[in-house]
Amino acid sequence: MHGHGSCTLGRNWKKGLVNGLIEEFAMAIRQLRLKKLRTLLILLGIAIGVATVVAVVSFGEGLRINAVEEVQKSRDLTLIEVSPGLRENGLVLISDSKIEGIKEYEEVVCPYVKDAYVSPSGTYLELFGVQEDYRTANELELAGGSWFDSGQDQIVLGSDLWEKLEKIDGARIGTPITARLRLYGEDGRPLDREISFTPVGYLKPAGNEIDSGAFMRLEYAKELSKKEYYDGVLIKVESSSLVRETREQVEKLGLSTSSAQDEIDSVNRIMNGVTLVLAFFSSISLLVGGLMVVNTMVVSVYERTREIGISKALGASESDILRMFLAECLFIGTIGGVLGDLFGILFAALIDKVGRSLLMSRLEIGNIEHLTALNFKILAAGILVSLLVSELSGLYPAWRASKLDPVRALRQL
């Protein structure tokens, strides 16, 4: 019997609480309907502020997504670049033993050396000594000629480098060209060494640093520069999801690694910062909406002084008066947030339509599908910000109303 009575009391308490909340909201709506024009202006002030923030944040999110997509288009997400590591006791070089250690984790491992050469006309070229796997890993495609074979002096040029050498140095397929390699003697003095190369092919544009490079057999490149160690290693993994794990294993060998994901992370950090700054300045319009709420609620307290006095004389507590005014602010914040999201969607669509065509025509940017990106988190944040601004703006007027002396309030009017 005792347990049954406790359950009944609990249900009655919850029912009374719900009824009380419904009554407070109904009263708030009635009060706001009495001042329709004033309420409409407040809602518009809040809504425009929320809409501005939503549109600007969606613009920043759209820029971030487009920037990340550009990185993904120009870089292979399954490639890992390995370079010598740094430790307290010095540089960790890439030796043959390190290469064997890396091959325990991955099958496609492409060590290489690179050196800077200069043509007679002063054209700079970075020559990579590579193996056949390097070509496969980077998916290099020939635009003309052939790939180097057993010939020691044969090189294949990137598209940009081939264009320069063809125009400036008169390079031709099959015709030897000369270039200078700068080495340093034991005494530290620079030694220029002139070397002859025979271009046998040139590559299709890749859209990255490969376009300005040249490639030859790894063994011959090491002989030319007299290197015992490798300058780097290119690793090709089966899936981009394996990149992080593979990098961790390689870094345990003391070597440094990088991948396209580093660029993506950097873009995300920069664009998140830009979006935050844009949102901060656009939120100034929300401050105007908040001041409108404060002004309106203060005027409302003055106009309803007699009503507040009668309510307190009839037994209403300070918390009852406080909730009554905060309920009005809550209603304003909810409706203002919903309207703000709707306006924000329209503003974002306008930015997307006008801004996208402007960027593509004036700045000669490639095809951009969308300049803005709206999602549920942005819209939900718009409503939450609206509620927060409305409630904080209504705290002082509500507190002032709850502290009114009922006797003085009744005497005032």
Image (cartoon, rainbow, N blue to C red):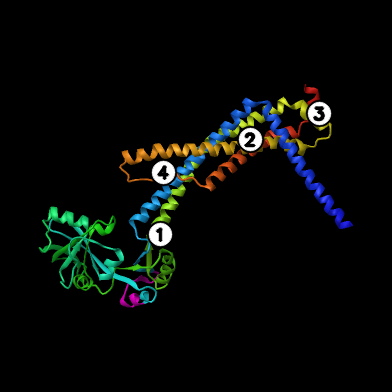
Q: Earlier in the sequence, mark 1 or mark 2?
A: 1
Is disc 2 placed on a helix, strand or loop?
Answer: helix
**Mark 4, residues whose alpha carbon is within 10 Å: few (<14), some, or many (≥20)?**
many
Q: Which mark is residue 261?
A: 1
The spot of residue 262 in percent (x, y) is: 40, 59
Q: Which mark is residue 269?
A: none
Residue beneath the point at 34% across and 68% down: 235
**Mark 1, residues whose alpha carbon is within 10 Å: few (<14), some, or many (≥20)?**
many
Q: Bounds of the magenta span? A: 87-100
Is disc 4 placed on a helix, strand or loop?
Answer: loop
**Marks 2 & 4, CB-CB < 8 Å contact:** no
Residue at mark 2 = 332
Q: Earlier in the sequence, mark 3 or mark 1?
A: 1
The quarter of the image holding the C terminus is top right
Please indicate whether residue 345 sits to the left or right of residue 396 in the image: left
Q: Earlier in the sequence, mark 3 or mark 4?
A: 3
Q: Is residue 260 magenta?
A: no
**Residue type, label 1:** Gln
The spot of residue 99 in percent (x, y) is: 33, 75
**Residue type, label 3:** Ile
Q: Earlier in the sequence, mark 2 or mark 4?
A: 2
> What's the distance in space between the residues labelled 3 and 4, CA to CA?
56 Å
**Residue type, label 4:** Leu
Q: From the image, state whether disc 3 or disc 2 is nearer to you.
A: 2
Residue at mark 3 = 310
Residue at mark 4 = 371
Looking at the image, the residue that sits furthest to the top is: 413
> What's the distance in space between the residues labelled 3 and 2, CA to CA?
25 Å
Residue 168 vertical placement versus 354 (above, below): below
Is disc 3 placed on a helix, strand or loop?
Answer: helix
The image quadrant of residue 107 is bottom left
